[in-house]
Amino acid sequence: SSTEQKRLSALPDLDGWFGRYGGRFVPETLLPALRELDRELERAMGDPKFEEKLDSLLGDFVGRPTPMFEAVGFSESISGPRVFLKREDLAHTGAHKINNSLGQTLLARRMGRRRVVAETGAGQHGVSAAAAAALLGLDCVVFMGSRDMERQAPNVTRMELLGAEVRPVRRGRSSLKEAITEAIRFWITNVEDTHYLIGSVVGPHPYPKMVRHFQSVIGRESRNQLLRKLGRLPDLLVACVGAGSNSLGFFHRFLKDSVRMVGVEAAGRGLETGEHGASLSRGRRGVLHGSMSYVLQDGVGQITEAHSVAPGLDYPAVGPEHSHLRDTGRVEYDSVDDSEALEAFDLLARTEGILPALESSHALAWVMRNATTLGRDTVLSLCLSGRGDKDIDQVESMRGGPS
């Protein structure tokens, strides 16, 4: 109903809950910092000068608005629907991550913090955090799993060139989950002068709300662009879902509209193998990194490892708002495996001259798989969340080419 759609778009409640998901599951020592952050966020959101400064930087530094591009060759090659790509890959630093990094770093400076600490998987959030910190004169420390540092070596170099200190994490599977854990530990011991610049819609309240707010520029622009191009809203929105920031930023402005939405998770080597990142498909309600959401767990509640060819989808949980949208049925969730994502990577490159990030390739692969069912009369918009330059070495390695 329209009443339910309006209620969904207004969440979370004052305590940071999206229905049964969210909250603050953190040590007592962090609660004052989180309450202060929530207060300052609300003040900044209501301050025309803050919003004016952010909008100015989003235009002049990030290059917004990003284009809405019709992928005619891609659509024809799959005999499927009209596909409009929201080109977040053209944002400065190469992905949607800069929207949130810039907003949070501007807020951190407003709060008098001298340093930001961040985690990164694919490296794009780390690069955007380093760029925003350099622009606004803050120090930057980035934690990154040693495995991801090998997979995304060019982004490590970019972070260091931008002045960030990149700290390798060699615990567990040395990927995004471990990087977040180490970043939180660092923040706990440096909370007085450091802001934790979390990269997605996860973590304790107010982070899921805050990251969604800074990423919702994607959906605001998309809605206006599509109305101008089509004279109406699209039938369908599609985006990849790891922890979930590009998809929520894309979907949020459309929650009140009668538009179908599909989030695409990483099926990895196959859901039946257990080597995947499909928290919403195969996870259970649990707590990870400060909030309640769908989490990949074993029979006794221990967090299980995630896998995806896309480092940004290699996370064993999802944001609490996605969990609520799944339970209410407002958004549908499906999954795509590694091989399908690689096929989509190739097809977009050859039909449109665009190298998509492997994360975004999951959304493209879902469209390819469902092209016949959707039909040529369907009009959809897909969030192309990042560019694939960072993934070239990995793609070649998986094909048996040069590593």
Image: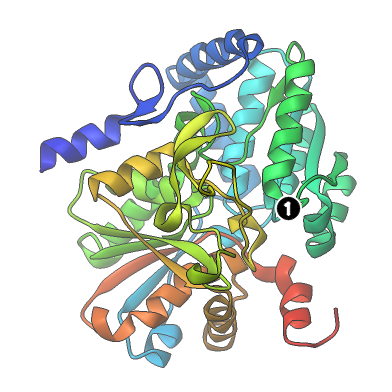
- Please state which amino acid type lies under the numbered disc 1: Gly
- Observer-nearest of 330 and 164: 330
Where on the picture, by quarter, is residue 136? top right
* Residue 319 image point, x, y percent: 47, 41
Q: Give the residue at x 76% y 48%.
A: 172
> Is residue 190 in view?
no
Q: Residue at x 28, y 30 (%)?
A: 10
Give residue 81's quadrant in the image.
bottom left
Which quadrant would residue 98 be assigned to in this image?
top right
Indicate whether 391 appears above or below 22: below
Residue at x 63% of width, y 62% of height: 307
Is 172 on the left-hand or right-hand side of 47?
right
Q: Determine which residue is flagged by label 1.
A: 123
For the C terminus, which image quadrant? bottom right
Quarter that holds the N terminus: top left
Label 1: few (<14), some or many (≥20) within 10 Å? many
Q: Is residue 306 left or right of residue 233?
A: right
Q: Position of residue 370 (x, y in %)?
A: 33, 79
